[in-house]
Structure formats: C-alpha cells, structure tokens
Image: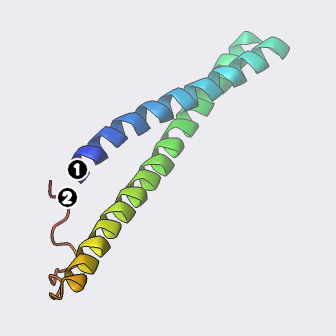
Amino acid sequence: MVSFLYVVSMIFVSLNALFTAGYFSVLLGVFLGSYYSQALGWVAGSILFLFLAPMLLFVSVVYVRVLLEIVMVLFRIAENTAALANGTAPEARSAGAGRYEA
C-alpha cells in the first residue's frame, strides 16, 4: 500500500513541480517582456524554469518521503501498542524489515 501511495504521490509531485515552475517562469517572462524586451523575458523565464523545477521537485520528493515514513512509523506504533494491550510481546523487527509491503 505504501509503495502504491509513493508512486502516485511522485506522479503528482512531478506534475506539481513542472506546473509551478512553469507558472513562475511565464510570470517572470511576461513581466520582463512587458518592461524590457520579449526576448529577455523568454530567456529569463527559461533560465528560471531550469533552476526552479529541479529544486521544487527535490524539496517535494523529500517532503512526501518524510510524510510517508511518519505514516509507517505511526502504524508500527499502533501495532506494537495493540500487542502490548493484548498482553503479548510486540514483534521484534530489524531496522528495515517489512518496509514497502502491501
């Protein structure tokens, strides 16, 4: 389930980074094009897009990854708490065991 959410969120994060960077690039291009020259606006907008899109993508991917890790930790805490409430010992898992299982 987590791997499915990760793939779906990466698709949306990629589209969001492209559209957001494109929006700000066009906005800068129109602003500079209206005051200076249209060629300067297009060049500045393209350069902004080339720098802004990867940065937004990286920050968004890290953000989504941290959120999904928090969700997995909360579910693991819930499982361990339920096991303790039932009077049984929680399962001992290694640090990476059970990750990304559906």
- Upstream in the sequence, badge 2 or badge 1? 1
Binning the other alpha carbons within 10 Å of mark 1 as few (below 14), some (14 to 19) or many (20 upward) gives few
> Is residue 78 or residue 98 the one in the foreground?
78
Badge number at residue 78 = none
Element type at mark 2: loop
- Report the side of 92 relative to 46 (left or right): left
Which residue is located at x 24 percent, y 76 percent? 82
Residue 101 coordinates in the image, percent (x, y)? 15, 58
Residue 73 coordinates in the image, percent (x, y)? 33, 69
Residue 27 coordinates in the image, percent (x, y)? 69, 22
- Report the side of 93 relative to 69 (left or right): left
Looking at the rendered structure, the kind of residue marked 2 is: Tyr
Q: How is the image coloured?
A: rainbow
Binning the other alpha carbons within 10 Å of mark 2 as few (below 14), some (14 to 19) or many (20 upward) gives few
Q: How many marks?
A: 2
**Can you identify the residue that label 1 sits on?**
3
Quadrant of the image occupied by residue 91: bottom left
> Is residue 23 or residue 50 the one in the foreground?
23
For residue 17, above or below residue 35: below
Residue 22 coordinates in the image, percent (x, y)? 56, 25
Element type at mark 1: helix
Quadrant of the image occupied by residue 100: bottom left
For residue 46, above or below residue 35: below
Mark 2 and mark 1 in contact? Answer it, CB < 8 Å: yes
Which residue is located at x 27 percent, y 42 percent? 7
Looking at the rendered structure, the kind of residue marked 1 is: Ser
- Report the side of 51 relative to 7 (left or right): right
**Can you identify the residue that label 2 sits on?**
100
